[in-house]
Amino acid sequence: MYPLLFRAVLSRFDPEFAHHAGMAVIRVLGTPPFSWATRALTKPDPSLQVDALGLTFPSPFGVAAGFDKNAVGVRGLAALGFGHVEVGTLTAIPQEGNPRPRLFRLVADRAVINRMGFNNRGAHAAARRLAKLRSGSPDTVIGVNIGKSRVVDVENATADYVASATALAPLADYLAVNVSSPNTPGLRGLQAVETLAPLLRAVREASGTTPLLVKIAPDLSDDEIVAIAQLAVAEGLAGIIAHNTTVSREGLITDASIVDAAGAGGLSGAPLKQRSLEVLRLVRGAVPAEFCVIAVGGVETPSDVQERLDAGATLVQGYTAFLYRGPLWGREINRGLVRR
């Protein structure tokens, strides 16, 4: 039903407008009495619980960063059956992001290109919302993804990340350092081990007891991925999120003129499936068994999630397929995992 509705109606709307409209509905679903009815339909089976990062996740499947940038839809997403919600990316300084249009559908590929540019209302505004969430939804697992403010020079990035961590870590179940978005100039250069090590060390100290993870790019070489995984272990991080969007356009079936018209940005969705598995296996092979590895990229079906879990993922996240499969996607994944 939803795929037909999407193709007939929703795909005609501007992607960013459609996202905000969908988020408005999700926010309503997170408030009583709508949340009670929603949870009755979508609550994950207890057999799906996962213990990781010192937390109990009701399902291994959660929402990746980028969907709820400002921590406004957490209750609704949790009500829809997702085992955790990673909010952000948040920056210490509020910012508008890149000029519109900046979000593009590649429907034939079940993919999206975005160059949003960390549009968000800032870490301190998010901290106030998270504080309210903590008092009203204490059992919802909330990760917080932080990035570099655009106006901050790369050489001052560490202090910028530390400012966000100081404000947000006390309110997060885990904190994720995003050094891998392709849409902030200079950001991916922070993935170089000699630059990343002092940054992670400073953020870990600022985060206190909150588990810290780092989110990497799929476009790194295999050797670079292994080196960052080993660095994360050496620096005492709790885990790695593998991975962010890609700048590659290989293997797309969408007409080249449409892809070219979309322009620069990170590609997400079904085309990332194979590389996602490759990166996951590289990371898992370089870290201890107890180290948390969150797999992201190309996840659409229960089989995709199970494949990631079988390949060593502790948890799995998705985002892009939400646009194509609809609001009951979390329930679909959870019920499929139980059947499998």
Image: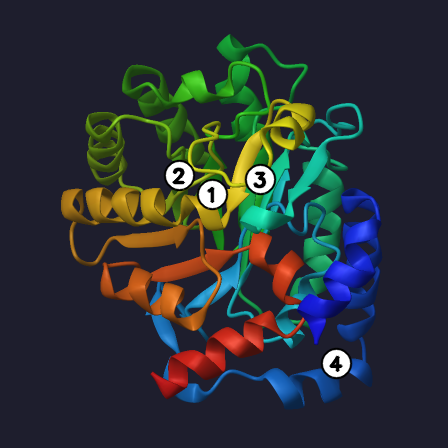
Q: Tag 1: Cα neighbours inside 10 Å, few (<14), some, or many (≥20)?
A: many
- Mark 4 → mark 3, Cα distance in angstroms: 38 Å
Q: Does the CB distance between marks 4 and 1 fall below 8 Å?
A: no
Q: Tag 3: Cα neighbours inside 10 Å, few (<14), some, or many (≥20)?
A: some
User: Which label sits on residue 35?
Assistant: 4
Q: Does the CB distance between marks 2 and 1 fall below 8 Å?
A: yes
N-term-proximal mark, 2 vs 4: 4
**Residue located beneath label 1 in the image:** 176
Q: Is residue 238 visible?
A: no
N-term-proximal mark, 4 vs 1: 4
**Amino acid on which disc 3 is placed:** Thr
Percent across and percent down for residue 231 are 24, 31
Percent across and percent down for residue 138 are 61, 71
Q: Count the marks: how many?
A: 4
**Residue located beneath label 3 in the image:** 254
Percent across and percent down for residue 188 are 45, 21
**Residue located beneath label 2 in the image:** 214
**Amino acid on which disc 2 is placed:** Val
